[in-house]
Image (cartoon, rainbow, N blue to C red):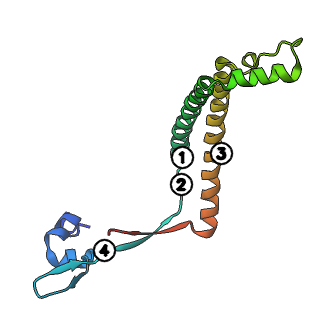
Amino acid sequence: MSPAERTASSPATAAASPSKASAAAPSRPAARTGPAQAVEVPRRVRLTLARVDPWSVTKLSFLLSVAVGIALVVATAVVWSVLDGMGVFTDVNGLLRDVVGGEVDVNLLDYLGFGKVLSLATVIAVVDVVLLTALSTILAFLYNVSAALVGGLHVTLSDD
């Protein structure tokens, strides 16, 4: 192909000439409601999600699971503080003393102290981050395999 032919077939010259531009890219259909008023009809495009990039799924799921882990630790701290402020732990402690008797010293806060509860919530959050990231990546690979077999997910988009 000569340089002159390349220039003639480039997208810039096709956009410059109205006949080639209308043949290459169909214009949006317009429905007329009156003689001087044009209403555009929204385009609908049907696309297929044939493949998902596992690395992008891994990055996104890691960030989202870190956010869920932080929310879990913060929610645990808030719930524990609210329960302690309402006196739930002291009431349960009094109930345990009544049930067990006075000779055995049982303190609920030895087992459910703020530090221990927050440490357990942090451990659960870290395990959650690892498991959700790994599971999401595995699911991305499984989606790619199944999309190769059945054709992927069909989506219809509209520009309403």
- Disc 3: which residue: 135
Relative to 56, say whether 106 is above or below.
above
Mark 3 Cα within 10 Å, few/some/many (few <14, many 20+)? few
Inter-mark Cα distance, 4 to 3: 38 Å
Residue 96 occupies quadrant: top right
- Which amino acid type is marked by label 3? Leu
Label total for image: 4
Mark 2 and mark 1 residues within 8 Å of each other at the beta carbon: yes
Residue 15 x/y as whole percent: 18, 69
Q: Residue at x 19, y 85 (%)?
A: 32
Q: Nearer the viewer, residue 99 or 61?
A: 99
Q: Nearer the viewer, residue 101 or 133?
A: 101
The label nearer to you, 4 versus 3, is 4
- Disc 4: which residue: 42
- Which amino acid type is marked by label 2? Val
Which image quarter is the N terminus in?
bottom left
Q: Earlier in the sequence, mark 4 or mark 2?
A: 4
